[in-house]
Amino acid sequence: MEISVEVLVAAPISKVWEAYSSPEDIVKWNFASDDWHTPTASVDLRPGGKFSSRMEAKDGSAGFDFEGVYTNIVEHELIEYSFGDRTAKVSFTEEPSGVRVTVAFDTEDINSADDQRAGWQAILDNFAKHAMSK
């Protein structure tokens, strides 16, 4: 099943794109709740390039590497990637009041669809706050 989440970011496309694709920015917004963080991130933003974000509970009780391979990149418009046997598509659409960022992703079988939607939306909301603060 595919789920989509989105946010409108009141910032120019160049700043939105940079905030989404720069490792220096990713570590500042890539978490679903304040008790988690992303201490490290790497990005090779090109088709076939790899990415990785280390996501950890701040108390050290849990953590995992979110990693995959970029499959399609259209600067300021689209980032597609695979992670494991799943895929995701991030679309950037300029609108009069900012940039609409939409993330569509394949669900996994461990967590409910509602929990996955809520988690990805929380991360995207953090992204928007960070991008608008730049």
Image: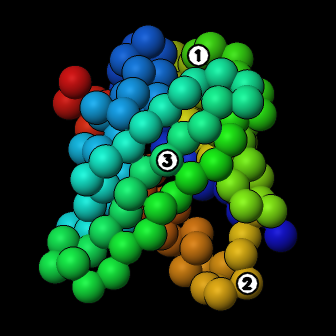
Which is in the foreground here, disc 2 or disc 3? 3
Task: Calculate the distance from the C-alpha at mark 3 to the C-alpha at mark 1.
Answer: 21 Å
Which one is earlier in the sequence, the residue at label 2 or at label 3? 3
Q: Is residue 24 left or right of residue 95?
A: left
Q: Which residue is mark 1?
A: 76
Quarter the N terminus occupies: bottom right
For badge 3, the amino acid type reads: Ser
- The residue shown at (69%, 35%) is 70
Residue 108 x/y as whole percent: 71, 75
Which is in the foreground here, disc 1 or disc 2? 2
Indicate how the structure is coloured in the image.
Answer: rainbow
Residue at the left extreme of this rendering: 59
- The residue shown at (67%, 79%) is 113
Quarter the C terminus occupies: top left
Task: Calculate the distance from the C-alpha at mark 2 to the C-alpha at mark 3.
Answer: 21 Å
Count of marks placed on residues: 3
Residue 57 x/y as whole percent: 26, 74
For badge 1, the amino acid type reads: His
- The residue shown at (36%, 52%) is 30
Along the line of sight, the residue nearer the viewer: 66 or 131: 66
Task: Calculate the distance from the C-alpha at mark 1 to the C-alpha at mark 2.
Answer: 32 Å
Secondary structure under badge 1? loop
For badge 2, the amino acid type reads: Asp
Pointer 2 local density, CA inside 10 Å: few below 14, some 14–19, many at least 20: few
Q: Which residue is mark 3?
A: 52
Which one is earlier in the sequence, the residue at label 1 or at label 2? 1
Secondary structure under badge 3? strand
Residue 102 x/y as whole percent: 62, 42
Secondary structure under badge 2? loop
- The residue shown at (69%, 55%) is 83
Q: Which residue is mark 2?
A: 109
